[in-house]
Amino acid sequence: MGNNTSLNVLVVDDSLIIRRNISNILEELGHTVVSEATNGQEAITMYKEYKPDVVTMDITMPDMNGIDALELIRDFSPDVKIIMMTAHGQEDMVIKAIKAGAKAYILKPVTSIKVVESINKLFKQNLTQEHIGDDLGEFKEIDDDFTM
C-alpha cells in the first residue's frame, strides 16, 4: 500500500463540528469520506453499507458508544481498521478500546498530523516527510503513555 493511496473513511462522532473537522482533514489528505454517523448504531449500519477502509470512531456518544459499536463491527468484520477519538481524561476508555480491537487512537483536538500518524500506524506505512511537520513530538508523547 503506497503513500498516495486514497482511503474510504467513515467518520463517527455525535458532534457535527467535530465530524466536519475530521472530514475536512481527511479530504485535505486526499482520502474520501464515504459517510458520517452520529452514534454507534448508525456506525454499524453505515459500515455494512459502505465497507470503508477506515473508521474514525468517537468513544462517548449517545445511544451506543464507540467501544460497543467497535465490538459489534468486529463480530462481522474482524479486520476492521478503527481509529478511536477520545477526549482528555478518558484514558481508561482508550485502553478498553484497544483491548476491544481499536488499532489506533487520537486524543482530541484532532489535527492533520495526528490523523496522518494514526493512518500510518494502521497500515504500517513509512512516514512521508512532506506531511509531517515539527508537531510530531506532541503525538509521540501521547503515544508513549499507552505503550502496552
Image: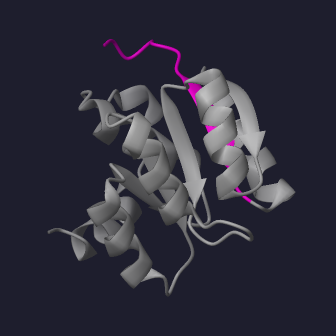
Q: Image quadrant for the C terminus?
A: bottom left
On screen, residue 141 above or below 2: below
Q: Image quadrant for the N terminus?
A: top left
On screen, residue 94 above or below 127: below
User: Which SS does the magenta portion mostly show?
Assistant: loop
Say which of 54 and 115 sits in front: 54
What's the residue at 24%, 28% (across, down)?
A: 126
Decide if residue 112 is on the left or right side of residue 148.
Answer: right
Q: Position of residue 27 (x, y in %)?
A: 68, 27
On screen, residue 32 above or below 143: above
Residue 35 showing in the rendered view: yes
Decide if residue 109 is on the left or right side of residue 63.
Answer: left
Magenta residue check for 126 = no
Residue lying at the far bottom of the rendered structure: 89
Q: Disc count in the image?
A: 0
Q: Position of residue 99 (x, y in %)?
A: 27, 64
Q: Position of residue 53 (x, y in %)?
A: 48, 25
What's the residue at 30%, 41% (across, down)?
A: 121
Magenta stretch: give its range: 1-13
